[in-house]
Image (tube, grey):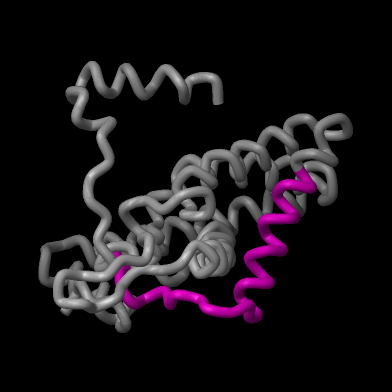
Amino acid sequence: LLVVPPSFPLRALVLGPDVLTPGPMIPLDNPLVPQQVSVLGNAYGATGWQRVLSATANLSEALRLLIFPARLTIDYSYAQLPVRTRIDAQVLLGALVLFGTVAGAIGLRRRSPAAALGLALLGLSYSITSNLVFPIGIAFNERLLYLPSCGFLLALAVGVDRCLPRRLAFVLLLAALCAGTLRIRARNRDFANTESLWTATLETSPRSARPY
């Protein structure tokens, strides 16, 4: 976490100062952008409450990807993930994920510092791109979970080491590696060319506008 603050000026030094300037946010990429009215009089975007509800609901999708990434897609643009206007089951599940992450990071800081560090890395790194604190250019994407997944795996490894026998843990690790290898091999076929990639995206994100 200590390397995050100096990474911004270093990135600006390499890529230029414009990289620190936020670009325009459009509802096609993120329907959770602040609510506005177009020149034609059409309203788009989400209220602050709708953004918080929707971003909280998306936490359950993030948890699914971390635990069981069977369905993968490159596109979560409008309207693959709906804008939530009320509290529903997915919002409650996302709130449970949020509460569990924060409570675990705080409650385990003395009993299991490594697990607490993992949960803190998971929560803090994902909060920046979750649309919970502030809206960003996209509503959700798998690549936003790269760094948070490191924290998740650290906490999971500590939990498995403490709760399961070593032999069973080794068997589960081997099974997870085999399953992951097969999933990667299958997913690589989607990236064979542009047509195959967007065809697969259309199947996994049928409500998203961009693949069409």
Residue interval drawn in magenta: 75-104
Residue 74 locus on image (x, y percent) = 30, 63
Quadrant of the rendered image containing residue 8: top left
Residue 65 locus on image (x, y percent) = 51, 62
Residue 61 locus on image (x, y percent) = 52, 67
In the visual, does 8 lie left or right of 25? right
Of the pair 161 and 39, the residue shown nearer to us: 39
Residue 76 appears in the picture as rendered: no
Marks counted in the figure total: 0
Residue 151 locus on image (x, y percent) = 60, 40
Residue 5 appears in the picture as rendered: yes
Q: Quadrant of the N terminus?
A: top right
- Going 23% across and 32% down the picture, which residue do you hit? 19
Q: Is residue 135 magenta?
A: no
In the visual, does 24 lie left or right of 132? left
User: In this picture, is 15 found above or below 96?
Assistant: above
Q: Quadrant of the C terminus?
A: bottom left
Of the pair 130 and 65, the residue shown nearer to us: 130
Quadrant of the rendered image containing residue 52: bottom right
- Going 81% across and 32% down the picture, which residue do you hit? 109
Q: Is residue 83 magenta?
A: yes
